[in-house]
């Protein structure tokens, strides 16, 4: 079974006393002092990514 976090476009990593939200390319998007806030931001970013991706896919599909 796949780890659900493997499929998330954003993940949380601890580094130098802060929690960083990192994208799939390894770029730091945001840094938080609190892990709970970082996880919430990562979840919101992932949700927004999926909704935007799906909407764009549907729109492109219906264009043809």
Image (cartoon, rainbow, N blue to C red):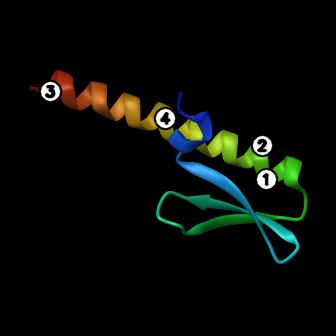
Res 40 label = 2
**Residue that mark 3 sits on:** 63
For label 3, the crowd category at 10 Å Cα-Cα, with few meaning under 14, some 14 to 19 and many 20 or more, is few
Label 4–label 2 contact, CB within 8 A? no
Label 2–label 1 contact, CB within 8 A? yes
For label 1, the crowd category at 10 Å Cα-Cα, with few meaning under 14, some 14 to 19 and many 20 or more, is many
Q: Distance between the residues labelled 2 and 1?
A: 5 Å
* Residue at screen point 38% across, 29% down: 55
Q: In this view, does 7 lie to the left or right of 14?
A: left
Q: Which element is circle 4 on? A: helix
* Residue at screen point 44% across, 36% down: 52
Position of 40 relative to 61 (above/below): below
Label 3–label 4 contact, CB within 8 A? no
Q: 2 or 52, which is in the foreground?
A: 2
Q: Which element is circle 1 on? A: helix
Which of disc 1 and disc 4 is earlier in sequence? Answer: 1
For label 2, the crowd category at 10 Å Cα-Cα, with few meaning under 14, some 14 to 19 and many 20 or more, is few
Q: Is residue 55 left or right of residue 60?
A: right
Q: Position of residue 11 (x, y in %)?
A: 64, 52
Q: How far apart are marks 3 and 4 (CA)?
A: 20 Å
Res 38 label = 1
Label 1–label 3 contact, CB within 8 A? no
Quadrant occupied by the C terminus = top left
Which of disc 4 and disc 3 is earlier in sequence? Answer: 4
Q: In which quarter of the image is residue 23?
A: bottom right
Of badges 1 and 3, the one in the foreground is 1
Q: Which element is circle 2 on? A: helix
* Residue at screen point 39% across, 29% down: 54
* Residue at screen point 67% across, 40% down: 44
Q: How far apart are marks 1 and 3 (CA)?
A: 37 Å
Position of 17 relative to 61 (above/below): below
**Residue that mark 4 sits on:** 50
């Amino acid at each position: 079974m796949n780890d659900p976090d493997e499929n998330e476009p954003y993940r949380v990593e601890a580094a130098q006393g802060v929690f960083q939200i990192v994208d799939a390319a390894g770029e730091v998007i945001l840094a938080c002092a609190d892990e709970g806030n970082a996880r919430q931001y990562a979840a919101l970013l992932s949700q927004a990514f999926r909704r935007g991706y799906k909407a764009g896919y549907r729109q492109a599909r219906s264009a043809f």
